[in-house]
Amino acid sequence: MSQIVWKTSAPRTGQPVRGARGPEAAPGRNRRRLPRDWWYGYLFIAPFFVIFIAFSAYPMIYALELSFSDWHGGGQLNWVGFGNYTYLLKNPQFWSSLGNSGILWLLIVPAQTLLAVGAASLLTRSKMRFTKSLRTVVIVPYVTPLAAMAQAFILIFDKNYGVLNAILHFFHLPEVGWLTTTTWSKPSIAVFVLWKTSGFALIIMLAAVQSIPEHLYEAASLDGAGAVRTFFSITVPMVRRQIGFFLVISTLGISQMFLEPYVLTQGGPYNSSTTSGLYLYQHIEDSDLGTGAANSFLLVILVFLLSLIAVRVLRSKEDM
């Protein structure tokens, strides 16, 4: 009778089990080696970092150092600490420029936001003819160069030769110094900015309104909600995030507003239309670069706080 010998699958002593992990595995077998061309990806993204460091990071760091110094464009930097900041915080013109920018914000941003949301809802849901043509007409002022638009606006609002005063004179009404009086200088600039930038606001709100699900409007119509109730109960809440985004960039734009008052009123009369951006330019024009740098950082802090407040106020319950 032959003897049957059964072969076991036990490994020999000193040989690791295939697929084993841990200390028993062969050293170095599971290590992944980097390919020889691993640095190619970093080479392709290197231009971005070089440009960012050269034109963004370094100028910002240098401007921060400049804000603590007294420098007029030549010679060495004279360290003054917080002297530039205290000078600005005690300067009535600085606070006057912030006040003018705040008034322009109140005159422009709320009306522009409401009109943009309303026009976007009307263009999206209505079946009016010439809708595409209307969109084109609204966007044309935004893509037109600002200096050219300002010159055309002066022809309308000029006190002596403007079209608007000619109409008032035709109806035997008193003429108004739209750009030469402290009462009307800021409202005139606000009208110009509304005319110039409403197309950009409409683009943002059109994209937001068109993303609202249609079944929400169908449910509202079945419940008997009217157009006004539907607008404030569905459209406005659903575009809350886009409104917050637009408020942030509008606040940033108005804090930097320079060319509009510079071309229309030169900041006058009596600095009644000198915005924070124009006041910052005056420091650069006077070669007071240290104070100008401090002014810019104060504006950055102020805009950041205002934007943070706007985002927190307009955020929905889902974002909390």
Image: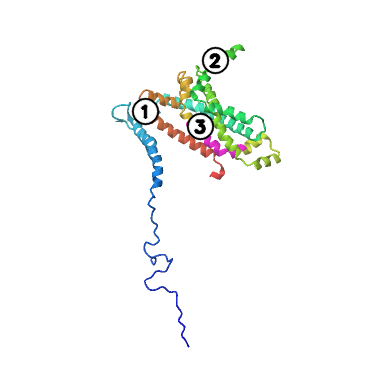
Q: Is residue 294 visible?
A: yes
Q: Is residue 40 left or right of residue 143?
A: left
**Residue 60 on image: x %, y %:** 38, 35
Report the front residue among 6 and 155: 6
Numbered range of the magenta stretch: 235-252
Q: Is residue 184 visible?
A: no
Of tags 3 and 1, which is closer to the observer?
A: 3
> Which element is circle 1 on?
helix
Within-10-Å neighbours for mark 3: few <14, some 14–19, many 20+? many
Please, what is the three-letter code of the amino acid marked with disc 3?
Ser
**Residue 241 on image: x %, y %:** 55, 39
**Residue 227 on image: x %, y %:** 67, 34
Please, what is the three-letter code of the amino acid marked with disc 2?
Gly
The dot on residue 192 is none
Residue identified by numbered label 1: 291
Residue identified by numbered label 3: 250
The dot on residue 162 is 2
